[in-house]
Image: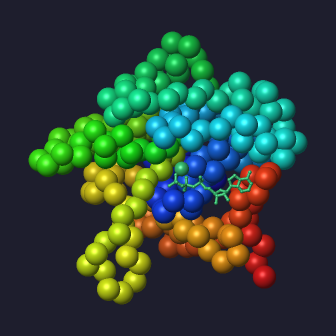
């Protein structure tokens, strides 16, 4: 599970399961508290058009849940560009306060894709980082004020000056690193598995866990 009251950022290469994890969390947040959920709803901001209600259905059924009910409690919102993405997040407070929706999870998948393409020109980086900073603050404020969990996904790029160790680094720079409460680095493991590593979390030990993505959703990998 991920924590309420902060932002969890998952970064990793293509196919490392960032989006699959988003789908699983959108289901899990609806479970009762005694089963590790938060008895709440999910807002799913989709920037790459990779959200799949069919997949939610499959996961729900795999868990023995009523798929239609689960889908009713996930509000999908497609963001067309970075400004629209920011606006969507700013509107979430209305859903909580005015419409009294019990939102306990906000997903932004992927956080950076629009920011990357909207501010790709020379000299636009400072502008991008300023907007991104505002966006992250908006998300963090929601998390803290309404004690909900925020899950954002991020891409990686190759770091050409790394000769030893892992040559990939999350994009978004310090703005993202600073504002994320927990950072998870996802990568492909052996035999189709995936590995999640907790990076630089002050209150958590550096740890890794392996999991697999199956028809029924994400499950821990049993140790061999
Ligand atoms: P990107 O950077 O391209 O957005 P991502 O990290 O979001 O990548 P996902 O789309 O979450 O990656 O991961 C895709 C992986 O999930 C694939 O490797 C695929 O094998 C697995 N997967 C997707 N759907 C299923 C399913 N129904 N059953 C089993 N595995 C699945
Ligand atoms: Mg994805």
Percent of width and height locating residue 136: 35, 41
Q: Is residue 87 above or below residue 215?
A: above
Residue at left offset 44%, top offset 30%: 79
Question: Residue 174: where, in percent of width, then height?
Answer: 27, 57
Q: Residue furthest bottom?
A: 164
Q: Decide if residue 2 is in sight here.
A: no
Note whether 115 is above or below 85 in the view shown.
below
Q: In this view, does 69 lie to the left or right of 137?
A: right
Q: How many marks?
A: 0
Residue furthest to the left in view is 123
* Percent x, y of residue 213: 71, 59
Q: Give the color scheme: rainbow, by chain, secondary structure or one colour.
A: rainbow
- In percent of width and height, residue 87 lies at 37, 25
Residue pictured at 43% horizontal, 21% vertical: 91
Compare residues 178 and 11 and report the one nearer the observer.
11
In front of the other: 59 or 175: 59
Q: Horizontally, is 88 left or right of 148 in the view?
A: left
Residue located at (72% from left, 48% from top):
36
Q: Which quarter shows the C terminus?
A: bottom right
């Amino acid at each position: 599970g991920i924590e309420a009251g902060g932002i969890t950022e998952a970064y990793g290469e293509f196919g490392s399961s960032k989006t699959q994890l988003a789908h699983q969390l959108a289901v899990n947040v609806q479970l009762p508290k005694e089963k590790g959920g938060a008895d709440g709803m999910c807002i799913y901001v989709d920037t790459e058009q990779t959200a799949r209600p069919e997949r939610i259905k499959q996961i729900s059924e795999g868990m023995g849940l009523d798929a239609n009910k689960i889908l009713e409690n996930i509000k999908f919102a497609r963001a067309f560009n970075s400004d629209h993405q920011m606006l969507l997040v700013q509107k979430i407070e209305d859903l909580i306060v005015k419409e009294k929706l019990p939102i306990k999870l906000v997903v932004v998948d992927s956080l950076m894709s629009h920011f990357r393409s909207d501010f790709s020109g020379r000299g636009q980086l400072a502008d991008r980082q300023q907007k991104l900073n505002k966006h992250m603050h908006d998300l963090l404020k929601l998390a803290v004020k309404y004690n909900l969990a925020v899950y954002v996904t991020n891409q990686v790029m190759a770091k050409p000056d790394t000769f030893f160790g892992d040559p990939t680094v999350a994009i978004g720079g310090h703005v993202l690193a600073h504002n994320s409460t927990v950072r998870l680095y996802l990568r492909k493991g052996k035999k189709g598995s995936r590995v999640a590593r907790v990076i630089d979390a002050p209150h958590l030990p550096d740890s890794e866990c392996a999991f697999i993505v199956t028809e029924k959703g994400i499950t821990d990998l049993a140790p061999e």
